[in-house]
Amino acid sequence: MATAKLSGFPEWLPADRAVEERIIDLLKHTFELNGYAGIHTRAVEPLSALAKDGEIDKEIFAVSRLHSEGSEKNPMGLHFDLTVPTARYVVENAGHLNFPFKRYQIQPVWRGERPQDGRYREFIQADIDIIAEDTLPEHFEYEVPLVIVQAFDALGELGVPPVKVVANNRKLIEGFARGVGLENITAVLRCIDKYDKIGPQRVAELLQEEAGATSAQAEACLKLADIESATTEFADRVAALGVSNDMLDEGVEALVKLIDQAHAQSPGSVVAQLKIARGLDYYTGTVYETLLQGHESLGSVASGGRYDALARTDKRVYPGVGMSIGVSRLMSRLIGKDRVLTATREVPTAVLVAVTDEETRAEANSVARSLRERGIPADVSPVASKFGKQIKFADKRGIPFVWFTDGESGHEVKDIRSGKQESAAADEWLPPAADLWPQVVRVV
């Protein structure tokens, strides 16, 4: 079959997939420790729910049947994040959920952006969200980034560097923009969001081209975006810019509380950075991005924010706050060109049972079955070849032990790394704990 490699759709080799699964296991464990329940939502949503005349619309993959009859009545697209489908899920299941609803979700998402370092068209995200009924207490805005910091601390056992969460508040940006006389707030947010990608000079030009700013207004916005502080000192620097607006004051106050609360629980892990805007239009309050220390060029590895009106019905609103970890983006650093992690073997198998000849395969199968019943992953050699070839078969896959049913003393097991071979009984023998399952280890 002729194949064509598609860029932006990563397919890991088995050993790398073991690394990814370990990352996911650690994230799930952290989320569950903090009371988040797991859910899974469908891959598609109506285009009417996904496309909202924002920048992300250009990246949505539309889905249709190859032999559809005429135009689809309700055209669908692959979800570009997990927040939009979760909002729909909450609305549809509100009568069966207990609020505040704390959920985690680890699934693929799809975006039609240009593939590059750490950016894919299909990638796995690991989300947490807290969704309330009618009113969302502000303390949840402090909890979410600290859970993300805790999750990265857990990944530290794999050699993942610590992170810094940078936060801002949409109300602060919008209030400042209105305070200097700008009205096209959506354009202002989109321009500020590109600060790191295109630099301040180009942002100033975009503010004038797309948001209708004068050069003085653009300069004022850049002065705001340049503010960063690990303490609440940022509030004084905002005040020094001399802009007055009630929404600005509200945003500053909310961000001050966030930095104070985060510092009390995890000093230095969350800092104010006023160029953070987030490109998705549904955010209404606090917004977050997360930088991997030493790998800042990778961009944000976990992002999110507060949304007050994404999930709603005619009678009820379900405000929420959440963040999403880019698992695939992390993988690009951990197993990429400068590999950090690997698995000790590419298969789960700890023991390969050798086959002397096809007449004794049944005995080999019996040994493997007995080992599996005791929780030891075992496989049987596919071919009754010379033992040297069967040992080589195991070695190529990283399988540490080979079992022989007709050794000098009967059943014997060999550690092919050390060459040590000893008598063994399938209903008693145990491998060392470190060899039972593949381990994810740092590359030396």
Image: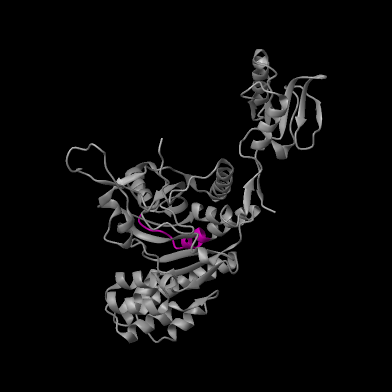
User: Observer-nearest residue: 355 or 286?
Assistant: 355
| First to last magenta residue range | 134-145
Q: Residue at x 43, y 84 (%)?
A: 239
Residue 390 falls left or right of residue 321: right
Where 195 falls versus 298 (above or below)? below
User: Observer-nearest residue: 340 or 327?
Assistant: 340
Residue 349, image x, y percentages: 64, 32
Can see residue 263?
yes
Q: Residue at x 40, y 61 (%)?
A: 306
Residue 419, image x, y percentages: 80, 34
Q: Residue at x 38, y 83 (%)?
A: 220
Residue 326, image x, y percentages: 48, 55
The chosen color scheme is one colour
Where 118 falls versus 431 (above or below)? below
Q: Quadrant of the N terminus?
A: top left
Residue 434, image x, y percentages: 71, 40
Where 191 falls versus 79 (above or below)? below
Q: Quadrant of the C terminus?
A: bottom right
Q: Quadrant of residue 186?
A: bottom left
Q: Residue at x 28, y 51 (%)?
A: 49
In the orientation shown, which residue stands out farthest toward the top?
359
Can see residue 244?
no
Is 136 included in the stretch rendered in magenta? yes
Q: How many marks?
A: 0
Residue 84 falls left or right of residue 36: left
In the orientation shown, which residue stands out farthest toward the front?
2
User: Observer-nearest residue: 397 or 222?
Assistant: 397
User: Observer-nearest residue: 136 or 369?
Assistant: 369
Is 424 included in the stretch rendered in magenta? no
